[in-house]
Amino acid sequence: MIKTAIGMPNSVSYTLASKVKDYFILIKFTLSFLVVFSCVASYLLAPNITFNIASIFILFIAGMFITGSANAINQTVERDTDALMKRTAGRPVAAGRMSVNEAWTFAIIIGAIGIIMMWYWFNFASALIALFSLFLYAFIYTPLKKVSSISVIVGAFPGALPCLIGWVAGTGFINPFAHFQGITAHGEIVQYANYGGYILFAIQFLWQFPHFWAIAWLAHKDYEKAGFRLLPSQAGPTKFSAIQSVIYSMMMVPVGMLAYYFGIGGFLALWILLACNLWMVYVSIMLVIKMNAAAARRVMFSSYFYLMIVFLALLFDKV
């Protein structure tokens, strides 16, 4: 009896910890964190926005709820295919540790809370974009993955929209041609065009192709087993697929320069972005030359660091 009484709290604690861990897996916490980081960074890059810990915290939580909701729906819909792949078989719904109803309920609740938070604390425009992004990822991109590799292009839109969500949360304007008065980091009063959010969107949009195709290259057999068509070539990891990564990496170079041209970042940020973009071109070219898993892995890991470095550089050198 004593052992049982002593063991019960430990058992309850273990069960609670396991449940919390499953929810973190369900929302893909690491991926969600990276996405929300770009949203918060874009918000801070918007004109007239200064560092405010309360606003940043609220935006972070709202972003995690919305992104987590989309990821939870994705895992619930793909539970059967997830169970077929070694990389995803341990996910809570696929493994049977969480019911479909529980996952759907959780996803709907946190998604709704996140959208309402964006509307109440920021503005309706940012909430509307967030809702569209959630819908596009969960209900268009997710089922399209089994139909065509064009799903990667479709999925890149909700993958990049957090940048626009953050920017619009700061400015309140969706129209890229809107103009408004702002104060620079140096205290100068200037006229701003609303291009910034769309430039940040374009940077993250293009980044996703070498990033995701490197992952698809490494996990090709798993994806093929589940019926997903994610690489540009139907034949899988081919020279054609590698060349596509080079093309999109090269497109990142001029787009990155636009951040300086339109006053999002300064001269230092320009050179850091240029260096990061040229590095992505280099590792993508090496994938074309070597055509092996090691080269694909280098593209993948380089892409993980890319976003952090680029957005931190823009924040550090905000004009």
Image (cartoon, rainbow, N blue to C red):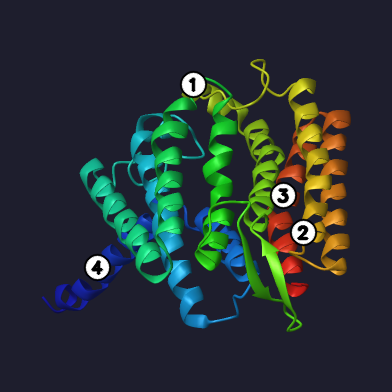
- Mark 4: give few (<14), some (14-19) or many (20+) Cα within 10 Å: few
The quadrant in which the C terminus is found is: bottom right
Q: Which numbered disc, 1 or 2, marks the residue that appears first in the sequence?
A: 1
Instruction: Classify residue 16 as left or right of residue 308.
Output: left
SS at mark 2?
A: loop
x and y percent of residue 212 in the render? 64, 39
First reached walking from the N terminus: tag 4 or tag 3: 4
Badge 2, how many Cα within 10 Å: few under 14, some, many 20+? some
Please report the residue visible at 69 percent of the width from the left and 62 percent of the height from the top.
Answer: 308
Mark 1 to mark 4 CA distance (whole Å): 39 Å
**Of label 4 and label 2, which has the lower sequence position?**
4
On residue 262, the disc is 2
In 3D space, how far apart are the residues under numbered discs 3 and 1 (Cα atoms)? 25 Å
Q: Nearer the viewer, mark 4 or mark 2?
A: 2
Residue 261 vs 240, above or below: the answer is below
In the rendered image, which quarter is residue 315 located in? bottom right
Residue of label 4:
11
Q: Which mark is residue 197?
A: none
Marks 2/3: CA distance?
A: 24 Å
Give, as a three-letter code, the residue at label 4: Ser
Position above or below: 228 against 30? above
Residue 162 at x, y percent in the picture: 54, 54
For disc 1, the neighbor class at 10 Å (few under 14, some 14 to 19, many from 20) is: some
Could you tell me which secondary element the residue under label 4 belongs to? helix
Task: Name the residue tied to disc 3.
Answer: 303
